[in-house]
Image (cartoon, rainbow, N blue to C red):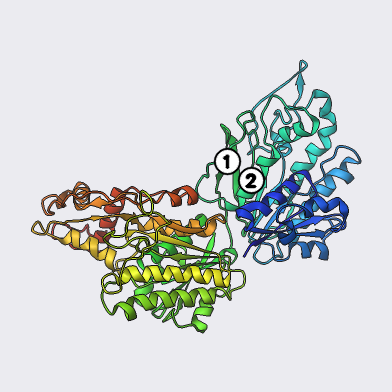
Amino acid sequence: MAELVCVTGATGYVASELVKQLLAAGGGTRYRVRATVRADPSSPRLQYLRDLPGAAERLELVRVPDLAAPGDALAAALDGARLLFHVASPFRFDGDPTADIVQPAVQGTRAVLTAAAAVPGLRRVVVTSSVCGAGRQPRAVGGRWRRSGLRGELWQDRLVAALLQQVAAGAASPWAPYVRALPRAVEASWRACPPDAIGGADLATFRWAHSVVMSRTFGNAGRGGGVGVRLLCPLIDMLNHAGDETPSGLHAPAAAPVAAATRLARPRLGRGAHLDTVAGARGGRAALVDRSAERAPEMAELVCVTGATGYVASELVKQLLAAGGGTRYRVRATVRADPSSPRLQYLRDLPGAAERLELVRVPDLAAPGDALAAALDGARLLFHVASPFRFDGDPTADIVQPAVQGTRAVLTAAAAVPGLRRVVVTSSVCAIHDMNRKQPPKGAAYCEDDWNEVSTLESEAYWVSKVQAERAAWALADDLGLDVVTILPNFVLGPVVSGGQGGVSVGFMRGILEAGRDAPLEGSWTINDVRDVAAAHILAAERPEAKGRYIVSQPESISARFITDTLKAAFPAAAAALADGGAAEANRIDSSRAVRELGLRLTPVAETVRDMAASLLEHGIAKPAWFTAVPAS
């Protein structure tokens, strides 16, 4: 299930380090690397690449004598790649400035990107540019170098800056052809390519500082900033994972704060280009910011969601349609009813649904057949959310069997889908502990290491269903070679997508809002926001390093008194109508792994309670006597 990526110019200084880190990514499981070289791949000179850890199993060297010459060799190198790192470019100061430096850089970029446009499923191209594309050679003034800040949004012809702060004045002249070549190559990728040349692939240029790289080569370590090759490669790789959040944890050495600048080229390629940028680092921290441009709907990545009408799944569909500014995903979602049913209009009315949402009828997920296969066909990601959330009916036939058999059928069908790279399965904290916490945690608090082993079919059938369904998912992941991640929400609250939604969570909040003073609320609940649960699913799908189980939950339970106090503060009319809830001792669960590894940000619990109540009132799901709806204008 490792993803195929292509790197051009593998023997280069940066590219060879990039190949090394790609092979090591995800503990050596994330990528298969196909790398272009000019020499015979069996050449003894390339033995150092073949000796890299993981190379024997996951590195393929492909001979492409001239990247600037389109042909079968280049097409074969790119065939099937999901990511392309175009690193190859002449880094020299001798020879003919035009023929030996500028033309190979520009023509190579054009040829590689044009060939990339013909590769189905290629989702991003990362082009290695240079700070040479952001600023001119520094000029000596009175024998001293003039210094100024280097900003990635400026092109080479717009900034006089200290481009190579660690290169002596005498070295300035030989750099001139190279300084001219890099911005022209980058301009070729943004301006010279035809409007649809990149198709649906993403393109990001990484303008990296030569100063530290050059100081290591020429022995001129010393003053000034810069980014070394070992920091550069993670930054390039992180372009693959750029999302709506700013990741942290990537730091430059304290003695060499990052002076690199990168630039997001403006959307010059017309429709079909999805562009991200790497912001210049400040204070030693590299920051990634997502900047999504127009992308043709047909180029968005296809994902599948099971059980789209559910409380969590409908929010997930909503967030997937909105991801990347509404350009990242096409969503195919399974429903049990006729997709044209008026009851499903709220899904068809979601922003972006008209262009990028397809509802597919699968009456019974537990029954393998053409309907399920058609729903999964062509999907790159699968979110298996559907599962009975009920406490009535026959414990085995209505709760446990549908959950387990549905999971088995969906994952078995998923294993037959070419190109499906990950399955995210919705489990539950019910698979961690029983309802009354009779089984103590292994550590100080319940966490992903715990499994519920005490719930019984007679008393806690829903808990049993979640345990057995998740265990079935992990067993199938091993047997079928699927990349599976599970999300384990606690009691889900938060706003609903539609007035037609019901279920346990909705009924819980509706009952509180409609209760009178003679029905005081008692108890405590460890909750999470439905929006956080959906976001966790997407983060788990998008981050290649995600693995195993992730609890999504507030770390402490809330009491009935907290809920009623929050509602009274939010809705003054409810103050006299609702009885005060009872107090309760807090229970704790360790949900830090999702925050730490996925970058999930939990919604404040009071906001969850307020927003859910407001949505039920707005949609007319809850109709307490104290609430007067505002007439529609």
Neighbor class of circle 1 (other Cα within 10 Å; few <14, some 14-19, many 20+) is some
Say left or right for 277 vs 142: left
Residue 71 rendering spot, x and y as whole percentages: 83, 64
Q: Say if mark 2 contacts mark 1, CB within 8 Å.
A: yes
Disc 2 secondary structure class: helix
* Up-down relation of residue 331 to residue 67 (above or below): below
* Residue sitting nearer the eye, 451 or 313: 451
Residue 246 rendering spot, x and y as whole percentages: 51, 44
Instruction: Identify the residue shown where x is 50% and y is 58%.
Output: 540
Instruction: Identify the residue shown where x is 70% and y is 40%.
Output: 229
Residue position marked by numbered label 1 in the rendering: 250
* Residue sitting nearer the eye, 136 or 519: 519
Residue 567 rendering spot, x and y as whole percentages: 21, 51
Looking at the image, can residue 346 be seen?
A: no
Instruction: Identify the residue shown where x is 53% and y is 45%.
Output: 247
Mark toward the start of the polypeptide (2 vs 1): 2
Q: How far apart are marks 2 and 1 (CA)?
A: 8 Å
* Residue sitting nearer the eye, 67 or 406: 406
Say left or right for 599 vs 415: left
The numbered dot on residue 174 is: none
Instruction: Identify the residue shown where x is 45% and y is 52%.
Output: 594
Say left or right for 140 vs 571: right
Neighbor class of circle 2 (other Cα within 10 Å; few <14, some 14-19, many 20+) is some
Q: How many labels does the image show?
A: 2
Which quadrant would residue 6 be assigned to in this image? bottom right
Q: Which amino acid does label 1 sit on?
A: Leu
Q: Which amino acid does label 2 sit on?
A: Pro
Residue 167 rendering spot, x and y as whole percentages: 77, 27
Question: Among all residues in the image, which is located at the extreme right?
Answer: 95
* Up-down relation of residue 188 to residue 194 (above or below): above
The numbered dot on residue 234 is: 2
